[in-house]
Amino acid sequence: MTKNYTLDELPKIASEVIKNAKNNVLLFYGSMGVGKTTLIKEIVKQLGVADNVSSPTFSLVNEYHTKNNEKVFHFDFYRINDEEEALDMGVEEYFYSNSWCLVEWPNKVENLLPLNAVTITITANENQLRTIELSNNE
Amino acid sequence: MIKNKSTYILGIESSCDDTSASVICNGKILSNVVANQEIHAKYGGVVPELASRAHQQNIVPVIQQAIQQANIDKKDLNAIAFTRGPGLMGSLLVGTSFAKSLSLALNIPLIAVNHMQGHVLAHFIEDENQQKPPFPFLCLTISGGHTQIVKISDYFTMEVLGETLDDAVGEAYDKSAKILGLPYPGGPLVDKYARLGNPKAYKFTKPKVDGLNFSFSGLKTAILYFLQKQVKENPVFIEENLNDICASIQHTIVEILFDKIKLAVKETGIKHVAIAGGVSANSEIRKVLKETESKYGWTTYIPKFEFTTDNAAMIAIVGYLKFINNKYDTNKTSATARLKVNES
């Protein structure tokens, strides 16, 4: 799936991501300020989470609960320097927990990512337009 | 109601990167040890930056040192207070398990503490040079992971009036610094260069957020676009104007913070305003807060720097306040990654 979108179209894009993803682990690639957290906020909302979704850069992982009491994990590996640090926080337990895992800066932990995780790349174009590319890695 | 003449509380904090232990006596700090290079130099071993394994290595020496520095025996302790959440699950578990074991071994009460309440109640650490805020007061808790305005009606009654909808203020600083090519975490560097620059040199639009909530992620994107445009015309734009850029960013961030805190004062009529959290070390925030005293007649409260970043003294003081109010927990209490400031 490849699509262009504006900020107004976020809800539609988020629902298409949920519909098209064939795995619960979603990896978000894209440079700083491109809107990874913004898209994730919308996805998390559509998964049925009522909590405020904020950036987990400092905390590394935020945990949200849906109305059905399912867990959604939101990661940000931006400030990680070494994959071992991610191992130490128990990242594998989260990734293989069957809960939704939305991952920012996955390139920092490349060797720890599940092989069948869904890859999502966001790029910024002219005029504030964004392009999203989703690929399932079955 | 104080049960002993001297009440000794051990506080343990392990919610994120740093392992810390503190002993306080009747609200006064006897020791406050944060695991850092110094500890490692003393006890040998490596320094992994993050995570539970580091906490496991640190927790015994850190607690030993806190008890030694306090010049007491662990048998003198009256209760063990520990951070129950919010934080990183693996890290919290280390502190929680250790606190439970020690309370069981010493047969003294266990007291679970909410990390966010710790930041706020650090203002009640006994210190002759620090004035304590009267109830009710407002507290702006600002750190790398949090940005919230809290109304405190008494020690144990708190309400979040507003919080960030995306990035925390410390993160806004660090990520702006990153865009400027400064090393992470670059917040303190932005503050340093900002002091030499013109805060009105460049204008960044402030986000429009209803009520008392904050948003900082738009600012990050605005800075990014602004710099991309400037660098296209002048490749050394950042280097030539670093001080002015930092001053303008800092000015915008501080304005965003104070627009909301002013609104909170207006809405609540409470003019006692405290700050807490690591970012309260920022020079401009301190200056602007201080200015509100003469400008608007506020009374402001700024904690000592060592109590602003994550530390166990703030956990120990909450432990003490709970202890004298008979608020204990049992061994059934568990660590939790999610915890709002009004929960305990």
Image (cartoon, rainbow, N blue to C red):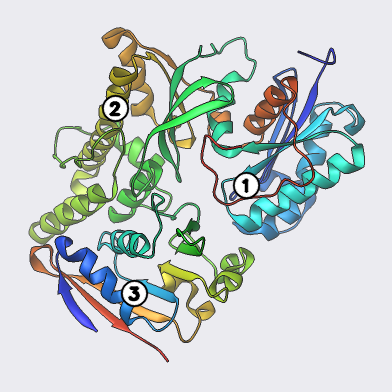
Residue topped by disc 3: A18
Q: Which mark is residue B18?
A: 1
Mark 3 closeness class: few <14, some 14–19, many ≥20 residues within 10 Å: some
Q: Residue at x 23, y 34 (%)?
A: B197
Secondary structure category for the residue under label 3: helix
Residue type beneath disc 3: Ile
Secondary structure category for the residue under label 1: loop
Question: Does residue B90 appear to the left or right of A38 in the view shown?
Answer: right
Secondary structure category for the residue under label 2: helix
Q: Quadrant of residue B315?
A: top right
Q: Residue furthest bottom?
A: A138
Q: Which of the two marks, 2 or 1, is nearer to us in this view?
A: 2
Q: Nearer the viewer, residue A40 or A80?
A: A40
Q: Residue at x 87, y 27 (%)?
A: B72
Mark 2 closeness class: few <14, some 14–19, many ≥20 residues within 10 Å: some
Chain letter for the residue marked with disc 1 in the picture: B
Q: Which of the two marks, 3 or 1, is nearer to us in this view?
A: 3
Q: Are marks 2 and 1 on the same chain?
A: yes
Chain letter for the residue marked with disc 3 in the picture: A
Q: Position of residue B326 (x, y in %)?
A: 75, 24
Residue type beneath disc 2: Phe
Taking the image as drawn, is residue B273 in sight? yes
Chain letter for the residue marked with disc 2 in the picture: B
Q: CA distance from mark 3 to mark 1?
A: 37 Å
Q: CA distance from mark 2 to mark 1?
A: 29 Å
Please determine whether, in this image, residue A1 is positioned above or below residue A75. below
Residue topped by disc 2: B258
Question: Does residue A45 appear to the left or right of A122 in the view shown?
Answer: right
Q: Which of the two marks, 2 or 3, is nearer to us in this view?
A: 3
Q: CA distance from mark 2 to mark 3?
A: 38 Å
Q: Position of residue B173 (x, y in %)?
A: 35, 44
Please determine whether, in this image, residue B164 is positioned above or below residue A20. above
